Amino acid sequence: MEKLEILINKEKIADCVGRLAEQIREDYRSKDFLMIGILKGSFVFMADLIRALQIPLELDFIQISSYGSAKKSSGKIEIVQGLKIRTEGRHIVIIEDIVDTGISLDFLLGYLAKQNPASVRICALLDKPSRRKMPVSIDYLGFTVPDKFIVGYGLDYDEQFRFLSDICIINEN
């Protein structure tokens, strides 16, 4: 039986989204940029971020997987859904829910580099550096979190808990 403990409440999340939007808006106000959300976890964060940005942008989604129904990454990455919009010569901001091992982002950065974008930056709501296996530079960061399994605000465990407004830790009892 899982017990949930609130780690970051919805008010702190909203403040963070506003702060990140302000930073991105300043950097991309006069640029034609493409925001790429990593599905499925980033969709709630990305929706709130886009509304807070209040500047023109294009968006696309990519779905990559390394977890399946497990709580730990398998380390093997596969593209489940590819991009639909051309990335060559574009300024790209990748939207990620949580950076954990860094393996998925390292894979995605390599995938995008082959398409010759003008620039690529990463915006992550959460960072779990204690689990890092591949170095990742996060340009826009919300919160650093402990090495616990995190759910809510779009993040899931086996497709459950995405609906939660707060970010929670699963404590197994």
Image (cartoon, rainbow, N blue to C red):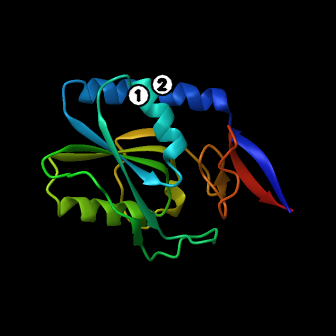
Q: Give the quadrant of residue 105.
A: bottom left
Q: Which mark is residue 48?
A: none
Residue shown at 57%/72% (left/top)? 68
Q: Give the quadrant of residue 147.
A: bottom right
In contact (CB < 8 Å): disc 1 and disc 2: yes
Tell me the element at label 1: helix
**Rendered view: 152 above or below 106:** above
Residue shown at 68%/38% (left/top)? 166
- Tell me if 112 is positioned left or right of 147 in this view: left
Residue 52: x %, y % from top left: 44, 25
Tell me the element at label 2: helix
Q: Give the quadrant of residue 38.
A: bottom left
**Rendered view: 148 above or below 152:** below
Q: Which residue in the protein does label 1 denote?
A: 21
Residue shown at 32%/25% (left/top)? 25
**Rendered view: 133 above or below 95:** below
Q: What residue type is disc 2 on?
A: Gly
Question: Would residue 86 be visible to someone looking at this image?
Answer: yes
In depth, the one of 88 and 2 nearer the eye is 88
Q: Which residue in the protein does label 2 denote?
A: 18
Residue 59: x %, y % from top left: 33, 42
Residue shown at 45%/32% (left/top)? 49
